[in-house]
Image (spheres, coloured by chain):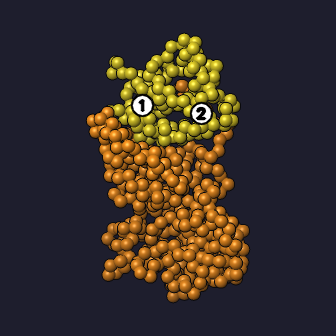
Chain colours: A yellow, B orange
């Protein structure tokens, strides 16, 4: 599929990655429009069900991104998020979801350039994977 | 830890257990006994809370019936102090589920003494009701003898539930006292083995003859576990293939009507209000129409695969494989097979075994600073 434009849902934490996205914007750093951001107060509040829902609704990729370890505004939310991502990476591939469709990154508030770079790379990766099975098959 | 034995007269194992439980119930600070018993009105066996030692006629902890996971009942009984001991007779998987509930603060071990009889398995509910009714009903003692001889299936070819055939825990590690049948000459005696201080205290107060070593026991258990593990591994690989992509998973779950019985029957699904029965999923009618319009059609009720995947994410690390989910499914979807197969890998990922030790924290309730870095970053697997 040559003109495949993936949809990527990004759960970004208010204090770090969302701020980095803001910074990317004010610094005129361009990044692909495929990323739909959902601001959450902390990656620690991203219940696995949000990620599962996004993937079943046809998201080609899901990103969870928060503060670097040790920098969490709520002290340890990102550590909890990491365990949940580990859990989902055990579950989802068993049902044919490529592990690369789920990403966890740490992007700090001042990493505007890194944010834009990560988004570009993420979109490129998901483009190579092609459309998700949830788009092609009926999900009950 | 201490061991003792109780004598079996006239090959009646049930009577021997009745005597034992009666003398336990007569101990001063034992307030009550929770034990599977026959209901007077029907051939069904349910957990019965007994306080009168003369009312033990109907007890039947050997019945191959497993209508519910008793962990839920024991959680209700142990939530708050009662000022005395309750002795509960539980299957190994019930104990493991209860240990998970204790970790989740849904029950307490403090005033309980847990007894567990070597578990020979149980039939699916529908099968048990058919076998226990009819003209020549299957008796618990018959089943027990046949199962000890290695034959759990009936002449008509009905075998115990798949969950039991795949269960590698016939002997309860978490019990205070294990009542041993496997590798024991049950026509002569039953073995009692304490596995905790509470258990040893109980045995010492019962004044029972001490047991000699059972030479065959370890080997008999090892053989049974090997047989069941082989069945389990085959189940894992068959189920893994049956759900290996979304299309196949959808096919697997096609009969699901979103009744959530599997959640209700699950001993470790402890949320008072599951998100799937809240208003979050009580959508406006127009919402369904919009979804349908977007795709041309949607299956009603919606969110079936979503429900099962979320349940796996929320609870598979606590799954003990008791099989009550399959028992509860009105459309015979092999939910236990799916759950156990996934639970195996999620528990392995966190080096966790559900129900193993009360001191091990559930994987999603703790974390370390430096771990699982392989899932972080844009190049992660």
* Quarter the N terminus of chain B occupies: bottom right
Q: Which mark is residue B164?
A: none
* Vertical side of B323 occupied by B293: above or below: above
Q: Is residue B58 visible?
A: yes
Give the Cα distance between marks 1 and 2: 22 Å
Q: Which secondary structure, mark 1?
A: loop
Left or right: where B35 falls relative to B157:
right
Q: Residue at x 45, y 68 (%)?
A: B67
Q: Which mark is residue A41?
A: 2
Quarter assignment of residue B73? bottom right
- N-terminal label among 1 and 2: 2
Q: Nearer the viewer, mark 1 or mark 2?
A: 2
* Vertical side of B349 occupied by B8: above or below: below
* Vertical side of B166 occupied by B206: above or below: below
Left or right: where B105 falls relative to B308:
right
Q: Nearer the viewer, residue A133 or B295?
A: B295
Q: Give the chain letter at badge 2.
A: A
- Disc 1 marks which residue? A59
How dense is the environment of label 1, judged by Cα within 10 Å: few (below 14), some, or many (20 and up)? many
Q: Which secondary structure, mark 2?
A: loop
Q: Residue at x 56, y 21 (%)?
A: A21
Q: Residue at x 63, y 24 (%)?
A: A108
Q: Give the chain letter at badge 1.
A: A
Q: Position of residue A15 (x, y in %)?
A: 63, 28
Q: Position of residue B70 (x, y in %)?
A: 53, 66
Q: Nearer the viewer, residue A86 or A108?
A: A108
Q: Residue at x 72, y 68 (%)?
A: B197
Residue sitting farthest toward the left: B296
Q: Nearer the viewer, residue B183 or A133?
A: A133
């Amino acid at each position: 599929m040559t003109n495949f434009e993936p949809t990527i849902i990004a759960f970004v934490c208010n204090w770090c990655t969302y701020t980095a996205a803001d910074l990317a914007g004010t610094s005129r750093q361009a990044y692909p429009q495929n990323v739909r951001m959902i601001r959450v107060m902390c990656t620690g509040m991203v219940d696995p069900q949000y990620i599962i829902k996004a993937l079943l609704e046809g998201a080609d990729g899901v990103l969870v991104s928060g503060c670097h370890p040790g920098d969490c505004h709520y002290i340890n939310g990102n550590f909890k998020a990491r365990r949940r991502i580990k859990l989902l990476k055990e579950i989802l591939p068993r049902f044919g979801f490529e592990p690369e469709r789920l990403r966890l990154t740490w992007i700090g508030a001042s990493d505007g350039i890194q944010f834009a770079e990560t988004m570009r790379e993420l979109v490129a990766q998901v483009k190579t994977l092609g459309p998700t099975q949830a788009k092609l098959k009926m999900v009950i | 830890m201490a061991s003792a034995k109780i004598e079996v007269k006239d090959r009646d194992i049930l009577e021997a257990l009745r005597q034992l439980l009666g003398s336990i119930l007569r101990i001063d600070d034992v307030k009550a006994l929770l034990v599977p018993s026959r209901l007077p009105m029907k051939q069904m066996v349910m957990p019965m809370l007994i306080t009168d030692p003369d009312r033990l006629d109907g007890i039947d902890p050997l019945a191959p019936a497993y209508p519910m996971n008793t962990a839920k009942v024991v959680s209700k009984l142990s939530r708050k102090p009662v000022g005395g001991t309750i002795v509960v007779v539980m299957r190994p998987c019930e104990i493991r589920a209860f240990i998970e509930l204790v970790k989740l603060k849904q029950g307490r071990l403090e005033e309980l003494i847990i007894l567990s009889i070597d578990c020979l398995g149980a039939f699916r509910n529908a099968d048990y009701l058919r076998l226990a009714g009819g003209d020549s009903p299957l008796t618990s003692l018959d089943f027990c003898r046949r199962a000890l001889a290695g034959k759990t299936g009936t002449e008509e070819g009905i075998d115990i539930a798949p969950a039991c055939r795949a269960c590698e825990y016939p002997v309860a590690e978490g019990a205070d006292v294990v009542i041993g049948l496997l590798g024991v000459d049950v026509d002569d005696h039953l073995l009692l083995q304490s596995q905790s201080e509470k258990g040893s205290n109980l045995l010492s107060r019962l004044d029972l003859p001490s047991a000699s070593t059972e030479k065959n026991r370890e080997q008999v258990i090892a053989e049974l576990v090997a047989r069941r593990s082989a069945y389990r591994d085959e189940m894992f690989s068959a189920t893994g293939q049956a759900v290996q992509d979304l299309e196949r998973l959808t096919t697997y779950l096609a009969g699901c009507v979103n009744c959530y019985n599997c959640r209700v029957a699950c001993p470790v699904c402890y949320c008072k209000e599951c998100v799937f029965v809240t208003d979050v999923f009580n959508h406006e009618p127009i919402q369904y129409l919009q979804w349908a319009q977007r795709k041309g059609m949607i299956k009603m009720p919606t969110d079936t695969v979503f429900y099962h995947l979320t349940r796996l994410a929320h609870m598979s690390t606590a799954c003990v494989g008791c099989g009550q989910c399959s028992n509860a499914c009105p459309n015979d979807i092999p939910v236990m097979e799916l759950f156990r197969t996934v639970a195996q890998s999620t528990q392995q990922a966190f080096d966790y075994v559900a129900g193993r030790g009360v001191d091990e924290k559930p994987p999603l309730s703790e974390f370390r600073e430096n771990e699982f870095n392989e899932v972080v970053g844009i190049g992660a697997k």
